[in-house]
Image (cartoon, rainbow, N blue to C red):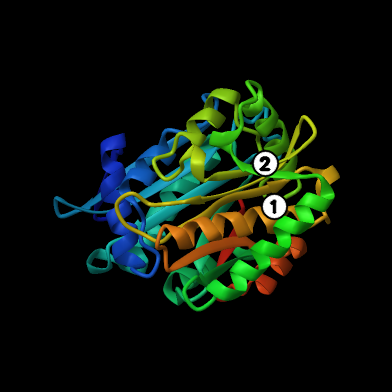
């Protein structure tokens, strides 16, 4: 497929490393791990539509563009997503605009009614292109970083306090590896689906099927002995886990979720403290996390734990 002066070819799993390189080159402060990118590409609803293309300029691979949407039976509002990135040497507003226009056309022909794209708040050129194409800011994602070296004493004190509180609450905090319940994955998925449903969002959440959920937990950045869960009686009521990039990048919060009935009792803080204490023991010097800007409970936890704001990710929305 030709778009302006570019050639697009369908991407395969083997192109995931190239895409991770492009994203890292464009945003070196947010390096992407090639193994994690490849794994993420394997996780999708079999009924979803996902198209990824490698973009070439004058015969040389120079970037990528993608579009996706859930099955319209599961997404009646018909939201679609578009992603694009070019290497700095190949970047131009005209090329970016042409790639987005091509993906919009494919989404429109496929029945999408709205599309969303993301941009960093300091990427004025990308944002300018989106605004010119009629996109408007929809919501923001807060990104944070925590210095584990400078904050070690504070984090250790919080962890000690949280452990005492969990004893009084009758809540067990342990790793997934230490949990011997044969039904733990089913319980964990039910709790995670409930928690994800309450995360503020514009594009509705579509829960993963069990097979895809298990595939997510098999990420090369995750390990059962680094996934922390909270148990109350027979129930799993919370989870928090850090992803450790195997090739490059910064350790980040992969997921923190709580059952509705267990919220407001300090369990999420206790779980996060355990992930941080473990990271400190492993020699990690800093960790990052991100949350929707309207998710007040988790934003409060981040602030009180000593996380410092970085730049925002901005979600843009356009009606087709």
Q: Nearer the viewer, residue 153 or 209?
A: 153
Kindly indicate the quadrant of the structure image that contains residue 249. bottom left
Q: Nearer the viewer, residue 180 or 55?
A: 180
Vertical position of residue 68 compared to residue 19: above or below: above
Q: Position of residue 169 (x, y in %)?
A: 83, 49
Q: Position of residue 253 (x, y in %)?
A: 54, 55
Q: Nearer the viewer, residue 162 or 191?
A: 162
Residue that carries the numbered disc 2 in the rendered image: 205
Contact between labelled residues 2 and 1, with CB atoms less than 8 Å apart: yes
Q: Residue furthest top?
A: 182
Q: Position of residue 172 (x, y in %)?
A: 72, 43
Residue that carries the numbered disc 1 in the rendered image: 201
Q: Residues within 10 Å of mark 1 (few under 14, many from 20)?
A: some
Query: Image point 59% across, 55% down: which residue?
Result: 274
Q: Secondary structure at mark 2?
A: loop
Q: Residue furthest left?
A: 59
């Amino acid at each position: 497929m030709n778009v302006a002066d570019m050639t697009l070819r369908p991407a395969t799993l083997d192109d995931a490393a190239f895409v991770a390189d492009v994203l890292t080159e464009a945003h070196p402060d947010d390096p992407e791990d090639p193994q994690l990118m490849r794994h993420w590409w394997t996780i999708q609803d079999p009924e979803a539509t996902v198209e990824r293309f490698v973009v070439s300029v004058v015969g040389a691979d120079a970037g990528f563009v993608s579009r996706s949407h859930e099955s319209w039976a599961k997404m009646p509002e018909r939201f679609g997503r578009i992603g694009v990135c070019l290497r700095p040497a190949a970047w131009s507003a005209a090329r970016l605009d042409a790639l987005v226009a091509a993906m919009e056309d494919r989404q429109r022909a496929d029945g999408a009614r709205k599309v969303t794209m993301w941009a960093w708040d300091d990427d004025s050129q990308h944002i300018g292109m989106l605004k010119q194409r009629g996109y408007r800011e929809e919501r923001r994602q807060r990104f944070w970083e925590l210095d584990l070296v400078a904050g070690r004493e504070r984090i250790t004190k919080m962890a000690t306090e949280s452990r005492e509180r969990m004893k009084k609450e009758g809540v067990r905090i342990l790793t997934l590896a230490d949990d011997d319940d044969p039904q733990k994955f089913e319980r964990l998925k039910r709790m995670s689906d409930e928690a994800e449903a309450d995360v503020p969002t514009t594009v509705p959440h579509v829960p993963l099927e069990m097979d895809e959920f298990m595939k997510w937990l098999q990420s090369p950045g995750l390990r059962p002995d680094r996934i922390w869960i909270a148990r109350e009686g027979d129930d799993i009521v919370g989870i928090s886990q850090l992803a450790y990039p195997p090739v490059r990048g910064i350790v980040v919060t992969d997921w923190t979720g709580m059952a509705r009935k267990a919220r407001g009792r300090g369990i999420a803080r206790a779980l996060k403290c355990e992930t941080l204490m473990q990271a400190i023991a492993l020699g990690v010097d800093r960790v990052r996390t991100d949350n929707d800007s309207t998710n007040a409970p988790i934003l409060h936890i981040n602030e009180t734990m000593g996380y410092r704001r970085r730049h925002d990710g901005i979600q843009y929305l356009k009606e087709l």
